[in-house]
Image (cartoon, helix red, strand yellow):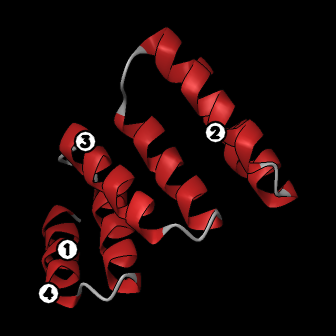
Amino acid sequence: GGDRVAAEIALALEVYVPLGSLDRATAIVDLAERREGPRGSLELARGRIALARHDGTAAVSAFQRGVERMPGSTEAALLLASALRAEHRSSESLVAYRRALDLG
């Protein structure tokens, strides 16, 4: 369930990403999704892994899916806003920041 997914996300993001083992981190998230189904928290993890890969386009896509799956999440909105800003998508970033403020 949810506790196991949270633990797997923590393992991927707090152990494997800092070590540079991004393929291993991705594999953990993929396995959790196959077992539990799509979840917003998994999309946020995918976005963070994409950022570690310096793949802003993939990060934005993952964070957008995270926002869709967790529309009440300030964290998801902030991650999306930040990724959009990094991709020089200023107007979209501003909308996402405003959404985060409204949620907070």
Tell me how far mark 3 sits from mark 2, CA to CA. 20 Å
Residue nearer the viewer, 71 or 52: 52
- What residue would you read off at disc 4? 91
Of mark 3 and mark 2, the one earlier in the sequence is 2
Q: Residue at x 87, y 56 (%)?
A: 19
Residue nearer the viewer, 103 or 23: 23
Q: Would you place residue 52 above or below residue 5 in this image?
A: below
Which mark, by number, is residue 26?
Answer: 2
- What residue would you read off at disc 3? 70
Of mark 2 and mark 1, the one earlier in the sequence is 2
Q: Position of residue 83 (x, y in %)?
A: 39, 73
Tell me how far mark 2 sits from mark 1, CA to CA. 30 Å
* Secondary element at tag 3: loop
Q: Residue at x 32, y 55 (%)?
A: 61
Which mark, by number, is residue 101?
Answer: 1
Q: Residue at x 49, y 14 (%)?
A: 34
Q: Are marks 4 and 3 in contact (CB under 8 Å)?
A: no
- Quarter location, residue 91: bottom left
**Callout 2 environment at 10 Å: few (<14), some (14 to 19), or many (20+)?**
many
Tell me how far mark 4 sits from mark 2, CA to CA. 30 Å
Tell me how far mark 4 sits from mark 3, CA to CA. 22 Å
Q: Are marks 3 and 2 in contact (CB under 8 Å)?
A: no
Closest to the camera, between mark 2 and mark 1, is 2
Q: Amino acid at mark 3?
A: Met
- Quarter location, residue 53: bottom right
Q: Amino acid at mark 1?
A: Leu
Q: Position of residue 44 (x, y in %)?
A: 44, 48
* Secondary element at tag 2: helix
Of mark 1 and mark 3, the one earlier in the sequence is 3
* Secondary element at tag 1: helix
Q: Are marks 2 and 1 in contact (CB under 8 Å)?
A: no
Tell me how far mark 1 sits from mark 3, CA to CA. 15 Å
